[in-house]
Image: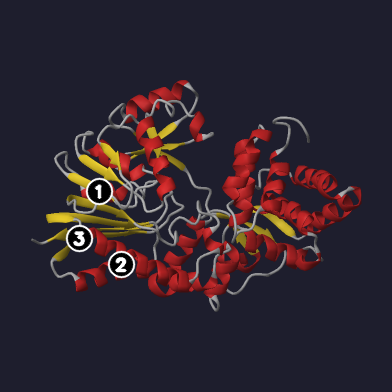
Amino acid sequence: MSGPKNKTARFIAAEVLNQFDPKRNYAGAILNRMLPETEQKQRATDLVFGSIRNLAAIDTVIDTFSGCPLERIQKTLLNIIRIGCYELIYSPATMDYSIVNEAGENAKAFAGKKQVGFVNALLHQIIRHITNRQIELSQDGIKRTLIQTAATGCQFDSDFLPDNKIRPADYFSTVFSLPQWLVTDWLKELGAESAGQICLAQNRRPSIYIRPNSLKTTAGQLIAKFGKEGIELEDVPEKAVLRVKNPKSVSKLPGYVEGLFVVQDITASQPVGLLGPQPDWEILDLCAAPGVKTTQLAELTNDSAKIIATDIVGQRLKRIKENIDRLSIKSVGIVPYSEFSGLTFDCVLLDVPCSNTGVLAKRIEARYRISPQAIAELAGIQSGLLDRAAGLLKPHGKICYSTCSIQRQENSDVVKDFLGRHPEFALEIEQLILPSAEGFDRDGGYVAIIRHRL
């Protein structure tokens, strides 16, 4: 297990989970420090993020079927078992004997030889209760099946999940490892069918989408360039992004260093597109870091608009500069948050801090950190930022307000409250996009285009 790039994906994943605390640090940062130690980077990433996304469901399986309560399992061994369970349930193409064998090897490496038998026996006990690692979903076995995709699941030999008809919030919360209060909100606002689709999307393996830098290339040219490297790109109709079908590390993709593209989800690309920025506009991106939407503004205005990018967190301005430099964008000026008072703009892009409830598949820690109180506090911050943006507009100017949340409290409620306090503004466009695991999968988010009437 020693030496450069000699560690397996499962070993790396166990190391990351041993250091990870969902409420205190970020798994991605820990993982990035360790990825140079393995050749299996994509697999290690899937094991880490997949285990964390599905943690409650995995722990329910261990507690129910292993014969050993969770609290009696040493944390280091528990993380090895969790990784094994993740693969057994959510990676049905992986042979169960290889999962168990390497779990034993990792138990030996992390905790000593005496623990090998314990880990192997526990995983074998769970395997004995799995009747089919991938089965077509049906209502008949829904209380004994953990959902993998919209069509398939892993089925066990007895009912262990809450009744989805009588206790839908408990059911979705357990199956998809999501806070029960959050699922309850979705059920109340959107109904059981939509809530179930949202939950599934929040636990998907997210596709990687890239937005071609229209100042340097076209979608067709990028598809051809990637194809020469054996990487297939799929055009997403009418969305100006491409899906990477067989991804690897983004910084290693062809054209990254030359600034030919930027990574951006389908939903995240929508607000600036709906705004329709013009080359003669003066634009402020008020919460700009890391600059993905800033660069989109520049591209859609042919690098001819006057764009100022800022962020209240000063150290994040460096990320904006890195992006505009890589994409060779000239129309963006980066200004500290306190230094543009007195200026007015044709448009303020306001991509506000939010709860991330539309992007839980990617922001994997968020499900363990959000709370109703935190959302209420965020709504107050968002309202304050909207008021700030309103004071920076020219007559007839526009605010593009966007979030990566799907909570009404952060979206339409904030906008409605703003319009009630500012009758000089009118709502032009409002769009809520729910996350989806179907077809071209996507995150969730919200956008409102608000126009100054005068």
Q: CA distance from mark 1 to mark 3?
A: 12 Å
Q: At 73% across and 36% down in the image, what residue appears?
A: 7
Q: Which residue is mark 3?
A: 391
Which tag is nearer the camera, tag 3 or tag 2?
3
Q: Secondary structure at mark 3?
A: loop
Q: At 26% across and 42% down in the image, what residue appears?
A: 297
Q: CA distance from mark 3 to mark 2?
A: 13 Å
Q: x, y percentage for residue 429? A: 21, 58
Q: x, y percentage for residue 161? A: 64, 70
Q: x, y percentage for residue 250? A: 49, 34
Q: At 34% across and 48% down in the image, what residue appears?
A: 288
Compared across the picture, whether 328 is left or right of 281 comes to: right
Q: Tag 3 or tag 1, which sits nearer the N-term?
A: 1
The outermost residue toward the bottom is 166
Q: Within 10 angstroms of label 1, few (less than 14), some, or many (20 or more) residues?
A: many
Compared across the picture, whether 242 is left or right of 201 comes to: left
Q: Secondary structure at mark 1?
A: strand
**Quadrant of the frame with the C terminus:** bottom left
**Is residue 280 depicted above or below 445 in this figure?**
above
Compared across the picture, whether 12 is left or right of 303 comes to: right
Dot 1 amino acid type: Leu
Circles 1 and 2: CB distance less than 8 Å?
no
Tag of residue 284: 1
Q: x, y percentage for residue 301? A: 21, 38
Dot 2 amino acid type: Ser
Tag of residue 383: 2
Dot 3 amino acid type: Gly
Residue 406 can be seen in this image: yes
Q: Quadrant of residue 195?
A: bottom left
Q: Secondary structure at mark 2?
A: helix
